[in-house]
Image (cartoon, helix red, strand yellow):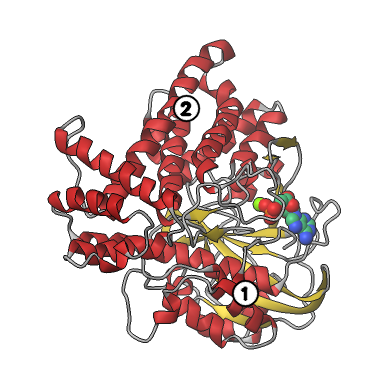
Amino acid sequence: MTGVAESTVSFHSLFAQELPELSVPWQAEEAPEPRLLVLNEALAGELGLEPAFLRSPGGTKFLVGNEVPQDAAPVAMAYAGHQFGGYSPLLGDGRALLLGELSLHGRTPGGLRDVHLKGSGRTPFARAGDGRAVVGPMLREYLVSEAMHALGIPTTRSLAVVATGRPVRRETMLPGAVLVRVAASHLRVGTFQYARATDNIDLLRRLADHAIARHYPAAGKAGNPYLALFRSVVEAQASLVAQWMLVGFVHGVMNTDNMTISGETIDYGPCAFMDTFNPAAVYSSIDTGGRYAYANQPVVAEWNLARLAESLLPLIDEDQERAVEPAVAALGEFRRRYSDAWTAGMSAKLGLRGHPEGSPEAEEVSRLVDGVIALLKDGPVDYTRFFRSLGEAARGNTRAARGMVLDLAAFDAWAERWRAMGPDAALMDGVNPVYIPRNHLVEEALAAATAGDLAPFRRLVAVLSEPYKGRPGLERYEEGAPESFGDYLTFCGT
Ligand code: AMP
Ligand code: MG
């Protein structure tokens, strides 16, 4: 097989066809010397793409958008968004292209997966940007998104990173790359904000119908499908953000253009996993006010969903006044859903099963959850290691967990009540990861990769692909950052 023309890749262009107002047909910039850095063979298989083809020169050209299958019609997608609370009426794919959709395991439309290139050159939405992306940050997105997937958290996936062979100007000159991202869709809250702002209700309705068909077909059968769509997104995001919180993930830039309708995590920029538990944890160099700090994430998600509700009002009821009440009620569900998901997730992290709401057992579980958070807040405790070592404690060996907290008397009192509830250690080991993409490990792997050695990156990807299973010989991947690592900040100029 030599080129994409001979391959069996068959693209849909559902988004481009159904929503031409949101699509600008566009082409990727020529990559002078494309070189495949990493390929996700398992994901390729799910999409019906031949790894042997993708590794060939023709396949690599396909992955950077320089050889486009005949049936594909790449587009840059339009969207708006609130960035750090300020509204930008036009953002869009400034450096990205949607190649089209592939059917996952032959299923449509719920089984469609967007294939999307990030770093493929300037588009009409590029504004002052150069349209490019850099090897380090694209490998970072690959690594963290695949780690999230392995943790069982909904996320966009990463199919490949290809170095373009072109140096890119940042603070210094850095090697350029394209990330090939796969997603249930790239519909964002900001896509709805953009469609709403056009005042074209037909467009807004087509967008909502497209979202329903792809993500929430059951909503299409509801009495008010658009209200049901909104409810579904509220539910999906409440569950998603709870899962972030449970693993200590800080997204870093929860702008409305970085929040999906599908409920997948998207846009791994200045994101990070907490080492030490800290509600105020912020890793983005530009988030000086802490808007997107760890503990703010549920509140921000709710704020973003309010922007989605505003965009959907004309569809929820022709009479906008009448639309407000059900929309507000649906938004109000976020807190309950989030809190239920958080409590259920924390109970599982503590090895405790669900109990009927309001029962004395449920109340004790809830006190134990509050108690463990108080212990974590009290001292510098490594969030991930602490929960994993509680699994040991459930088996009777409290030494490791106890050794991590400052207030031993408080720990002992808490642990006694907790053990009285009969925590299930096996349940805990299935939800408390051993391996997370720790910042110092990520940086180490990216620095080596940028210098040309991909071995540490590949090793880390492999370690993170099975996060819940401790393996001998991988002890250094469990450990917190060495003190020399200092305070961690990531930068948005990706
Ligand atoms: P992000 O922070 O990655 O979510 O991007 C926010 C907006 O900036 C989106 O509209 C991107 O397409 C755009 N953007 C980010 N980096 C670049 C770049 N290097 N060139 C053009 N547009 C960019
Ligand atoms: Mg974005």
Q: Which residue is mark 2?
A: 331
Q: Which residue is mark 1?
A: 161
* 388 on left or right of 84: left
Place of residue 311 in the rendered image (x, y in percent of width and height, measured from the top left): 61, 28
Categorize mark 2 by other alpha carbons within 10 Å: few (<14), some (14-19), many (20+).
many
Q: Amino acid at mark 1?
A: Val
Place of residue 161 in the rendered image (x, y in percent of width and height, measured from the top left): 62, 74
* Residue 109 in view: no
Give the SS element for disc 1: strand
Q: Nearer the viewer, residue 348 or 19?
A: 348
The mark closer to the camera, 2 or 1, is 2
Give the SS element for disc 2: helix
Q: Write the residue at 69% across / 59% down.
A: 97
Categorize mark 1 by other alpha carbons within 10 Å: few (<14), some (14-19), many (20+).
many
Which quadrant contains ligand 1?
bottom right
* Quarter that holds the C terminus: bottom right
